[in-house]
Image: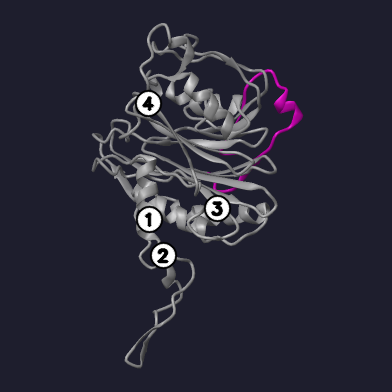
């Protein structure tokens, strides 16, 4: 059951500027969601923010490509190696063969969202290292191997995600994963206190810290809000009108903090009317505009850990809207606000090598 009775489910994954809930000078922001169509399709959307440029590009992975898992020693090949079952399109980081966001050829879509204060990965032994991968490989592993949320839920308990650092990140890349499949199932994958935690995501939205269960509890504090305007109040024969339309969501939290973004995304999803997948795709862009962080709105000093060791600004580097029915991945970046649309072609699916497309076009 959703939090209300609307017939369409809008689940949004928006990765947009997170000022840490627990540490005053840390900021990492991501927001995500999904919108459901009346024609059994789904639209996944998210924003990406960080304190240093991620230098993302569109990365295409074909079927049958061999990947090397990074083991506990941080060396590629010492972990769990695998061959991609499904082709994938998505956004990478630092020019590396990994995904921070993406969709595969059968429609499984999702992303990694920062969780610096809560993510704590597993500690496999040397003997278990060959059955482990590094945190930054988690989404890559999921999208290249699985078609459904159910398959992911069955596979992850049988392997490890280790705590090996990522040089380009400057340490362990701490995040949580959101996934959505074409059946409408959604899943949040976290590693908390060294243990795997998987939660079915009823609403489909996700942001950053605190842990996902905290966000689900917090949303109950906002059940009084609705997209439907409230009627005027009458007292002793006198009527008091709202200043304008829009009083149904009066009091919706508006900051860039992760809990506030989670509430906004959830309320937008729950109040979006039913429509076809193509219509929901267009609506998703407008919803995501509400999580676009302007340059200068979040300033990080060199001690924050998110500014790359220097004073920096965190802003929305790119926004994704993926049509899970048409298997189309659409992205616009800070430098190029025009939408770059990429789909699966037979030549891409059956290629022998990885390929990439710059976001600048």
Which structural element holds mark 3? strand
| Stretch in magenta | 336-361
Q: Is residue 130 above or below residue 50?
A: above
Closer-to-camera residue (342/105): 105
Query: Which of labels 1 and 3 is toward the front?
Result: 1
Which structural element holds mark 2? loop
**Sequence-earlier tag: 2 or 3:** 3
Q: Which residue is mark 4?
A: 195
Q: Residue at x 43, y 24 (%)?
A: 135
Task: Tell me the number on the disc at residue 225.
Answer: 2
State the CA–CA distance, disc 4 to disc 1: 26 Å
**Sequence-earlier tag: 4 or 1:** 4
Disc 1 and disc 2 in contact, CB within 8 angstroms = no
Q: Residue furthest bottom?
A: 237
Which structural element holds mark 4? strand
Task: Tell me the number on the disc at residue 10.
Answer: 3
Disc 3 and disc 4 in contact, CB within 8 angstroms = no
Quadrant in the picture for residue 109: top right
Q: Which residue is mark 1?
A: 220
Disc 4 and disc 1 in contact, CB within 8 angstroms = no
Quadrant in the picture for residue 220: bottom left
């Amino acid at each position: 059951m959703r939090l209300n009775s609307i017939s369409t489910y809008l689940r949004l994954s928006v990765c947009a500027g997170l000022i840490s809930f627990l540490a005053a000078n840390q900021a990492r922001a991501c927001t995500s969601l999904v919108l459901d169509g009346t024609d059994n399709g789904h639209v996944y959307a998210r924003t990406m923010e960080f304190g240093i440029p991620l230098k993302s590009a569109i990365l295409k992975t074909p079927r049958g490509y061999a990947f090397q898992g990074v083991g506990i020693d941080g060396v590629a090949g010492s972990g769990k190696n695998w061959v991609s079952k499904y082709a994938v399109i998505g956004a990478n980081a630092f020019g590396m063969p990994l995904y921070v966001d993406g969709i595969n050829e059968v429609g499984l879509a999702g992303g990694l969202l920062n969780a610096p204060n809560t993510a704590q990965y597993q500690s496999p032994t040397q003997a278990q290292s060959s059955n482990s991968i590094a945190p930054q490989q988690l989404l890559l592993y999921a999208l290249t191997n699985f078609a459904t949320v159910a398959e992911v839920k069955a596979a992850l308990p049988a392997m490890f995600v280790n705590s090996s650092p990522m040089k380009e990140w400057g340490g362990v890349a701490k995040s949580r994963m959101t996934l959505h499949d074409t059946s409408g199932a959604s899943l949040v994958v976290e590693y908390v206190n060294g243990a795997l935690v998987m939660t079915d995501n009823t609403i489909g939205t996700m942001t950053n810290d605190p842990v996902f269960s905290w966000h689900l509890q917090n949303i109950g504090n906002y059940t009084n809000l609705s997209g439907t305007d409230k009627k005027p109040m009458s007292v002793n024969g006198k009527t008091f009108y709202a200043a304008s339309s829009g009083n149904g969501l009066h009091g919706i939290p508006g900051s860039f903090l992760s809990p506030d973004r989670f509430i906004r995304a959830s309320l937008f999803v729950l109040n979006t009317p039913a429509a076809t997948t193509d219509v929901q795709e267009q609506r998703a862009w407008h919803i995501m505009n509400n999580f676009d962080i302007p340059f200068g709105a979040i300033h990080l000093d060199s001690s924050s850990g998110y500014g790359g060791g220097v004073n920096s600004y965190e802003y929305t580097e790119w926004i994704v809207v993926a049509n899970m029915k048409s298997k189309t991945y659409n992205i616009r970046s800070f430098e190029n606000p025009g939408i770059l649309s990429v789909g699966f072609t037979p030549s891409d699916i059956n290629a022998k090598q990885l390929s990439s497309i710059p976001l600048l076009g």
